[in-house]
Amino acid sequence: MGKKNGVLNICMIGCWYKNDMYSHHLNNLIEVLDKQPDINLRLVTSNCNCYSSAQRYSIANEELLNSHCIAIKIPYAPPEPSKHYGMLKYQIAKIFRLNWILETLRGIQFYRTTRKCDIVHFDQVLRSFGVLSFTTLLFLSRISGKKLIVTVHELDPLQEKYKGLNKHYSRASKLIVFSNGFRDKLISLGIDPDKIKTMPFCAPLEPIMGLRRDQFIYFGGHNLLKGKGFDTLLDALKILQSRGQEPKIIIYTGKGCNGLEEGKQKVSDMGLDKFIRWSEFLYGTNLANEYQKSIACLIPYTGGSGRHAVTSAMANATPVIATKKADLPEYLGESGIYVKENSARELADAIEYLMNNPEVVKSLGSELRSLAEKRFNKDLIGKELLELYRETSALK
């Protein structure tokens, strides 16, 4: 199957929730692809855990980053019920494993939207865009001879629990990952290395506005208390407080962040409220402004991924203080300020150092912006993805 009338029809399936980093990465690429005369894009999404309307089995248009997409509306059943979701209803869903059934049905519905497409691109995150939807979509695509590319942002817990599922990924036309470290992880799970392509996370390059840098910025993701070094950050602030320093920090998180209220309580219990300003997920001009007002981005992570925070910082000429986990050295190289995991003292020392050395902040920021322009800007990554589509189209 190849181009029809010189046009390559692509169906992109993924999260389009505007308060999530996944949708913004995808939308950055689409802004590049939409400029290509030989590319026709069809966008598909579904209700998931993040949407406030998800439990009504629908999607509110104002929650979508891109409203020009087909929405698959199938009930979302969280695998771990809570009072927040309706304990009785979702305990029944868990007992009968309805989430497995619903995600399989979602995969079928995803496939139905691809009938006129040459290539299907599935953006795997979690939940409604996890391994069950993917394997169903893969099975149906192979039957019909469609080519399927999958971007894997992170491992679905089912991939690690049932390792036999990983063999299916080698049957896709191509897998896209964001770091060589994660590529090695997939290879260790038995996925064909020839099918895996590393393509960095991208960031839009907003103009540098020359704003006063008088704060620090920290992204808490979707699980503030797991793998983010949050306790280390708070301990570092206590050390700085004892030294008479008063750094201001903006902490922003993904919508529905786990541990957010507990984290806020910890801040209050430690008497650190005056240091911290909380924010919902940042994107677009608001994100650029907050990063460009920051002395540094703090990423004391012990696991997971720091690619959103690190590329946002680099694109906005903001220095980065980070551990060497979460694939960060692949992005920062020698231009990051590295601290040991769980070392509050090293983190405090690095924060204090940049507070007292504005010339270093300016120099490091300029270095990181230059690196972002050369390796991580959306135009470069978008063109790389375009070439992958064309190469995949030509495969027998």
Image (spheres, rainbow, N blue to C red):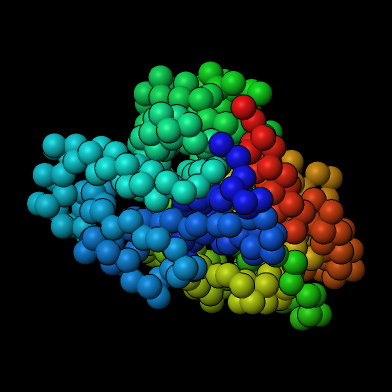
**Image height check: is 379 above or below 186?**
below
Image quarter hosting the C terminus: top right
Q: Is residue 38 left or right of 318 when viewed as pictured?
A: left
**Image height check: is 87 above or below 66?**
above
Q: Pick the residue in front: 273 or 249.
A: 249
Q: Is residue 307 left or right of 304 when viewed as pictured?
A: right
Q: Pick the residue in front: 301 or 150.
A: 150
| The image quarter in which residue 242 lies | bottom right
Q: Give the residue at x 79% y 65%.
A: 317
Q: Outermost residue toward the front?
A: 5
Q: Is residue 106 left or right of 229 when viewed as pictured?
A: left
Is residue 298 among the parts visible in the rendering?
no
| The image quarter in which residue 388 lies | top right
**Image height check: is 63 above or below 302?**
below
Q: Give the residue at x 33% y 71%.
A: 60
**Image height check: is 90 above or below 391?**
below
The x and y percentages for residue 23 are: 52, 59
Total labels: the figure holds 0
Q: Give the residue at x 43% y 33%.
A: 144
Q: Give the residue at x 61% y 77%.
A: 286
The x and y percentages for residue 1 are: 56, 36
The x and y percentages for residue 45 are: 41, 56
Q: Pick the residue in front: 318 or 390.
A: 390
The x and y percentages for residue 51 are: 34, 63
Is residue 111 among the parts visible in the rendering?
yes
